[in-house]
Image (cartoon, grey):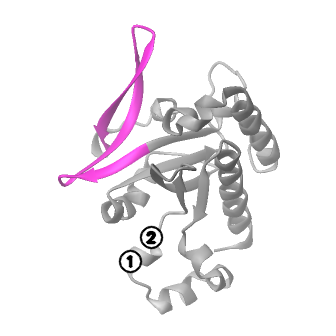
Amino acid sequence: MDFENRIKKEMTEGIVKAILEDAGYRVIDSGIEKVIRELSCMSSFEYAKLAYPDAMSRLPDFTVMTKDQDDKFLVEVKYRSKWGKDLFEEIRPQVEIFGELVLVSINADPPNHKGLYYPSTYLRCCRVRYQDEKYSVQLKYEDDQVWRHYWKAVDELKEDSLWWAMSQLDKVFPLLKDRKLDAQNSIDSAIKALSGILK
């Protein structure tokens, strides 16, 4: 991985970790680069030569648990300067191995037709799962001024409003909702800290 991409990856993961820890979650680094730190200094070619098993090389970035350890999320974090639905195909082998993941994504250049600034404009998440040979993503829609979630096959996704159909973090990580104001301040601070790599 080249230096600039490594910096973006580290910053993105660090910010997501800080937001979740600030809300009271336990966040455990579980990605292979964190478990075997020496890998981060290798080129893609050197890493490929080591031929780690697929399940190891596709470990999610974080295992996130509540303080009581009665609920857990496997979390994959992705930063994109140009975000698109192809990201779901990129993580498909990982989802097939683990069954279900939460994808947390930072989009440096989100579609923002109204020109409004909210931290959640840049930071979204969704559950993705592979179940009964079907690969699907959980999206949201508005019904009678109430947001509802539904599962949609990844093969049927359309690019146009996909970013906005993903959820804000507090819809997937409920402890953020319990501390709404603090969480909003944390997310706002996180996005400001990332402003150097956002468009």
Q: Residue furthest left?
A: 132
**On screen, residue 116 above or below 1:** above
Q: Residues within 10 Å of mark 2 (few under 14, many from 20)?
A: some
The residue drawn where x is 44% and y is 45% is 85
Relative depth, front residue between 66 and 148: 66
Compared with 51, 78 (above or below) is above
Query: What is the number of the mark on residue 143?
Result: none
Q: Is label 2 in a helix, a strand or a loop?
A: loop
Q: Could you tell me which residue is drawn at 60 percent across and 49 percent down? A: 25
In the image, the segment drawn in magenta is 127-153
Which mark is drawn over residue 54?
A: 1
Q: Is residue 90 or residue 103 the one in the foreground?
A: 103
Residue type at mark 1?
Asp
Left or right of 50 in this view: 39: right
Q: Name the residue rendered at 57%, 89% in the picture.
A: 46
On residue 58, which mark appears? 2
Report x, y in % for residue 42: 64, 85
User: Relative to residue 2, is residue 101 depicted above or below?
Assistant: above
177 vs 131, left or right, is: right
Query: Does the stretch in magenta take in 139?
Result: yes
Percent coordinates x, y for residue 23 in the rendering: 66, 41
